[in-house]
Amino acid sequence: MKKATKLLALLAALVVLVGAFAACTNDGGGTSSGTTSGGDTSGGDTPSGELHMSVNLASEPETIDPALNSAVDGAVMAHHFFEGLFKWVDDGSGLADGTGNAKLELGQAASYDKSIESDGSVIYTFILRDDILWSDGEPVTAYDFEYALKRLANPATAAYYASIIEGVIKNASAIRSPDNPDDDPEEWTFENAADPDSLGVTALDEKTLEIILENECAYFTELLAFPPLFPMRQDTIEANGDLWTYDPATFITNGPYKMEAWEHNSYIHTVKNEHYYDYENLGPESIRYVLMDDQNAMLAGFRSGELDFIEDVPIDEIPALLDANELHVLEYIGTYYLSFNVQAAPFDDARVREAFTLAIDRNHIVENITRTGQVPADGFVPYGIADADPAGDDFRTVGGQWYSVDPADYEANCERARELLAEAGYPDGEGFPAVEYMYNTSDAHRAVGEAMQADWLRELGVNVSLNNQDWNTFLQTRKNGDFQIARDGWISDFNDPISFLDMYVSGSGNNNAQLRSQEFDGYINASRAATDPAERMEILHDAEKFMQDGYIVGPIYYYTNKYMLNDNIDGLYYTPLGYFLFDYCHYK
Amino acid sequence: MIKYIIKRVVMGLVALFVVSILTFFLMNLVPGGPFMSEKPPSPAVQAMMEEKYGLNKPLTEQYVTWLTDLLKGDFGVSYRMQKNRPVLTIIKEMFPTSAKVGAIAMGWAIVAGIALGCVAAYKRGKLTDSILRVVTTSGVALPTFVTASILLVVFAGGVWNILPSIVGTSSSWKAYILPCFTLGLNPMCNIARYTRSAMLDSLGQDYIRTAYAKGLATPFIIFKHALRNALIPVVSYVGPLIAGILSGGFVVETVFNVPGLGRYFVQSINNRDYPIIMGTTIFLSAFVIAMNLIVDILYRVIDPRIDLSKGVE
């Protein structure tokens, strides 16, 4: 009987331990030891030879159709899958911490001509390279660009980013103007709008593309390196409809990498495109975008060597990772700010908005809460966006500070804030109504909210409650103006202040502050009509000055981007618009 | 028996119908929508998308359309997460992954849970029993995300780097160890506890004493006589759980990046991808209902004394 008991106990123990045993035994092959070439841990573990990179940008992208994409992760993938007339290249200055190291160069275009007509319109004529091919071996032609741009402009495509060519490429605005814009949007039709074929883009022959602009546009060449303006293949899109992006056989691309597999919610695997003109010099044999949404899992994946690159880590880990010089910080053209609902009391009073903005201790927030090199914001449009003279001071520097962010001046700012609040009828916060700060659910946003809550109570005597909503609900709340103060943020799409300012025209989908100002709309319209770059910048400064005088928004800090890269890998480059480029990465 | 099964199937269909109505209208009550984005479409584009997917029609009409399509086997297409891909294709891709992880987790939980429960019962009051009680109680108390995080730190890079942490990208069977262990730990501990108390009951019965008196060997008594009766409460715990585990644990799938249906379901709610929410809800509900029916039939196989038809009336 005793023997039988032992047997039973042994059986139970065996069952429990089998997992642990399996865990501890190597399968004989090269198991990972610290860093690997990425992907499966059973790969070779010496950092030399062929590089197979595993990177995590975000979770599953909504779409990888460059025209329909509106997210940074989708744009990064688009930059590897496709190539526009211009492209970003490594400027050779290296990347660890600090500024981006990408510069703009001709991509699919070999050369171009530019002529300015007497009516102010501008004609660009691009000659395409001779050696450009699609991933199926067909030549890339000017017709592919014409098709892609007309598809983008066509309202039926429902491309979120089509608005960026409005007022830029000839006729884009006319094509995209609904018949009765003042009525209920649900009633809008485009029946009387201009034909998408009338867009000012024409393929003169297989290799010559003509693009006509309404006016001179300082950032046009940069736009040509922006995913929605990349060329596309009419045959595959028309044959496969919206599903063309899901299958490697139909996702025909012209960039350095092509899709080999897409395991949904898991990874997108890409390999070097043998038809790409610079195939010989490309870096990684393969780039695998691992699709993840948990920050702890991202860091664990990086630590275990399954990921070579991550952009996000748990907020609590940041200080330790920075100290260890594992996490790197880069500039990012974006602003984290408050949107005040300017239509509803008490924030319909500019003095109240200014008081709330001045009383925020930004240095405390960036030093103790966000802690990844963010810069206290002293204006809405961030640093790094070019002014009329691209070589001179940037837009922010020319526009000047809205207020001082020197820690020494904080007390004076608060003094001024108290005066303003008293002028508005709330001395020492007396009689101030109950107000609420709304943010989307996240530890980081809550921490910033709590810091401001304390500032407003201490400096202004005003009690502000905090409330949060899930992301999708929050977007709706903010868009509808069902808030008093809301968290807001904006990353620039291209290097021009209009990317920030045109959000606040009446009726814009991003006009969270609910601003309805003919004066402001007038500035934006005038800037679109201006033909002289200096004059145009002047108008945009007026527009920002309008926002400053009215404190339509309360700037908090300028974003930074962060990343962790496998120590053995070099050759990463980055544009301050948030695009990391891996196509020339290699082992050190 | 046949009559009983038919009755249960009909009841299941009614339940599905109610679930679909509730889900559909609750989902539409929640603010936000499938086209919400930080860089939102212009009102005109939004109106066109709503037109395209019929979202500008009254809710009841939308529901009737959805239901009619469903009866024809059409679950609709995703609005957002895998734009315009058929929902059924997505479910067919994601569910097997969840089911695979769930089946392995359930498998080890049942085998180890019953074995440990038997040992604890047999060694009642001894040190082995006490140790097992501490282990199983901790296992029940630990939330899945804590277990998952500890395992990640210990086995995937923090202390040792011996196991993959990302299931989706790995072709190695070893990638399944951590998620399956995590997912099965809590059920295993519960099963061990249930088995222990049921076994104690069983071991005190007269027929066990008779078996010992006949001089039968202990393993034979435990497995042949005691365990069979002790299994009934375990089955009633495991039955409903199977459907839940096989359809995917959200936490485990998120932390270990398992491309399964459980995680996708939660993502679809965050994205307000209505057809995916509806499709996965109906699919998972149908699965739970079917599994419960199968478990009820299994009861009868284990214990012929249970009369299924009476249980319903």
Image (spheres, coloured by chain):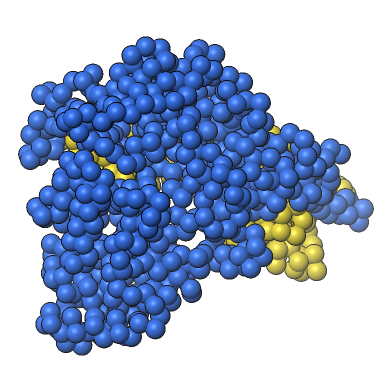
Chain colours: A blue, B yellow
Relative to B130, does residue A334 appear above or below in the rendering?
Answer: above
In which image quadrant can residue A266 be found? top right
In which image quadrant can residue A63 be found? top left
Q: Is A74 positioned to the left or the right of B56 in the image?
A: right
Q: Is A427 positioned to the left or the right of A139 in the image?
A: left
Image coordinates for residue A114, horizontal then vertical, percent: 33, 29
Q: Give whichever of A182, B292 is nearer the camera.
A: A182
Quarter of the image containing the N terminus of chain A?
Answer: bottom right
Q: Give whichever of A472, A149 is nearer the camera.
A: A149
Q: Give whichever of A505, B243 is nearer the camera.
A: A505
Residue that lies at the very extreme toward the right in this rendered image: A3
Seen at 18% across and 80% down, the residue is A420
Image coordinates for residue A299, horizontal then vertical, percent: 61, 54
Seen at 21% across and 20% down, the residue is A198
Relative to A556, does residue A171 appear above or below in the rendering?
Answer: above
Quarter of the image containing the C terminus of chain A?
Answer: top right
Image coordinates for residue A205, horizontal then vertical, percent: 37, 11
Q: Give whichever of A167, A479 is nearer the camera.
A: A167
Seen at 52% across and 55% down, the residue is A99
Q: Is residue B103 visible?
A: no
Image coordinates for residue B24, horizontal then vertical, percent: 28, 40
Relative to A460, does residue B200 appear above or below in the rendering?
Answer: above
